[in-house]
Image (tube, rainbow, N blue to C red):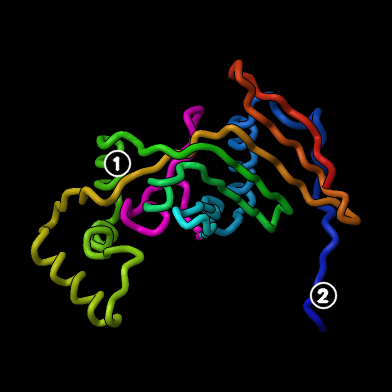
Amino acid sequence: MTIGSIRKDYSQASLSEADVLADPVAQFAKWFDEAIMAQVPEPNAMSLATVGADSRPSSRIVLIKDFDQRGFTWYTNYSSRKGEALECNPSAALLFHWVELERQVRIEGQVERVAAEDSDTYFQSRPLASRYGAIASAQSEPIADRDALEERFRITETTCGSQPERPPHWGGYRLVPDYIEFWQGRRSRLHDRIAYSLQPDGRWHRQRLQP
C-alpha cells in the first residue's frame, strides 16, 4: 500500500441549508453535543493555528473549555509560542475534526484574553497536579532534560502548598468568531460545506461552498 492509495469514501450523513440553524454557535453546540453522544474521543480537542511576528504559521492541539455567543475559550501559558504569536497578531483559526462522524468545523476570528477572574476560577477548578504543572513549566522554553522538568515540579509542590494561586503568565483566551464553516464528508469527495460569515450589521450570512 502506498500513501496515495489510502482513502475512504464518506457516507454517514449529509448537510443541507435546511439542516443547519440560523445561528452558527447554536449549530456548533448541536454538533458538539452529537460528538459527545457518539463518544468521539476527546471531542473538545481542536487545532489552534496562529501566525507569529516572523509571519510563520504554527499549529497545535489544545482543548476548548467553554463556548458561548462571545466566542470559544481555552487556557494556556501567555508566554508560550502561541501566546507570543497572539500578542503580535491576534488573528487565529480553530479546527475541530470529529473523524468518527466524518465532520469538521473551521472557526476564524480575533483572539482576546478572558477576564482575570475567569482565569482564576478555571485555574482553581483544575486538578492540583495540573496547577503545579502550569506554575512549574516555562512553556515552549528549552530545558536540559526530563529530570530538570520534574525537579521544577517537585520544587513547585513544596513551595506552593495545597492552594496555589494562578501564575500571572497563565490564563484564558477567547476567539471571537467572524467565520464558521461546517463540513460533512460525502461520497466521491462531493462534501457538504456550509459557511457563515459575520456581516457589519452583526448578522450571519450563510452560504454553501463547493467542496
Read off the magenta span: 60-83
In the image, residue 88 above or below residue 142: above
* Separation of marks 2 and 1 at Cα, in angstroms: 45 Å
**Where in the figure is residue 185, as x and y percent of width and height?**
79, 51
- Please give the residue where the numbered disc 1 appears in the rendered image: 119
* Pick the front one: 179 or 69: 179
Query: What SS does tag 1 mark?
Result: helix
For discs 2 and 1, the disc positioned in front in the rendered view: 2
Quadrant (top left/top right/bottom left/bottom right) for the N terminus: bottom right
Q: Residue at x 32, y 63 (%)?
A: 139
**Where in the figure is residue 102, as x and y percent of width and height?**
73, 54
- Judge from the rendering whether residue 154 lies leftward or rightward of residue 102; answer left or right: left
* Pick the front one: 188 or 33: 188
Q: Is 62 inside the magenta-drawn segment?
A: yes
Q: Tell me the tag on residue 161.
A: none
**Where in the figure is residue 143, as x and y percent of width and height?**
28, 76
